[in-house]
Amino acid sequence: MVPVATRVAKAPMAIPFVHLTAFSTHIAGGNPAAVVLLSPEQDAALSNSARQAIGANFHQPMTAFVVPRDVNEDALPDHARAFNIRYFTANLEPGLCGHATLASAAALFADSARVPEDVDTIYFHAKNGVVVARKAEEGRVEIALAAGRHEPLPAEDPRAVELRAALARAIGPEVKIEFMAAGLGHLDFYCLVEVATDDLRSLPVKASEFMNSPFIVHVLTTPSDDPTVAFESRMFAPAASVPEDPVCGTAHALSTPYWAVKLGLHAQVEGSGILARQVSPRGGELRIRIDEEGLVRLAGPVTVISRGELYV
């Protein structure tokens, strides 16, 4: 009898991950992200389709994949390290995600095997540029994002007409719109909308109505009644499979320069910073300042929810 050849199943890769929530001190708040910690060998072996499947399985607002960069550490500033980072939602790969970068930095700062304890700065190389993360006061983590630019939308602009119609369906025609603007540059698919409401947190929003908007990301914002908080916001992007984002870093990179001008907060924003609050159901707070290079620095706490291993 001729023996039948058998194929030995290849052992799956065991890849560590950390599940965290950014901009909150408790697990029921902030914006969750899964951070997958890859070795260079695992990074080379993991296909794009596998990353997308992992993102779909985690089904978090964002899943980040980080791997050390192959660079000469002597070329980095003292007490710094560099990593490549990629982001996946359940169905697409964005070029940049602020809260997942914050979560990734927190995961790495807490992992002395990957980042020595004396390291206080991490350079994340993403598709849309380099994001610098630093240790901040009181255990917070700070990331620096390019300040968002915007242009007001004239009433006769076809985008303004479509956006107003979408807003009327989403929040009701009785809610007054104080200001509408389109994002520019890398945020050209964002819109910024100041609404007149005393309670943005409780404002009923039919997020699905924004599917008929000319923009992907919709940032609704209003000044805060809390004297310690400069402004509040909510963010909706159903076309990107995000009905409502719990806390969005890039939305604040767009809205902070607007409020700094409108509220006359330049001295505070360029000094110790201001406090902003995203009033989604989960909610979160961000300490924000704009540095001498014009970068928007967002700082917040990050809380670990769970740790484990993926088997791929």
Image (cartoon, helix red, strand yellow):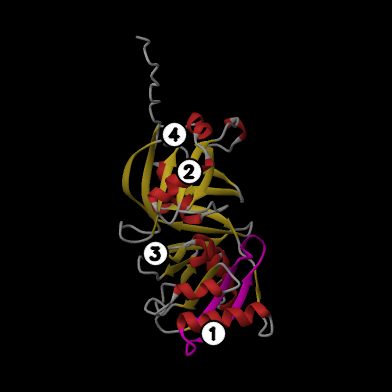
Find the residue positioned furthest to the front: 1
Disc 3 to disc 4, C-alpha distance: 28 Å
Does residue 174 appear anywhere in the picture? Answer: yes
Q: Position of residue 219 (x, y in %)?
A: 52, 71
Question: Which region shows up in magenta?
Answer: 172-195
Mark 3–mark 1 CB contact (< 8 Å)? no
Q: Relative to 161, is 62 above or below?
A: above
Mark positioned earlier in the residue sequence (2 or 4): 2
Disc 2 to disc 3, C-alpha distance: 28 Å
Mark 3: which amino acid?
A: Gly
Mark 2–mark 4 CB contact (< 8 Å)? no
Q: Position of residue 7 (x, y in %)?
A: 40, 21
Q: 235 or 165, which is in the foreground?
A: 165
Res 51 label: 2
Disc 1 to disc 4, C-alpha distance: 48 Å
Residue indicated by mark 1 = 177
Does residue 271 appear anywhere in the picture? Answer: no
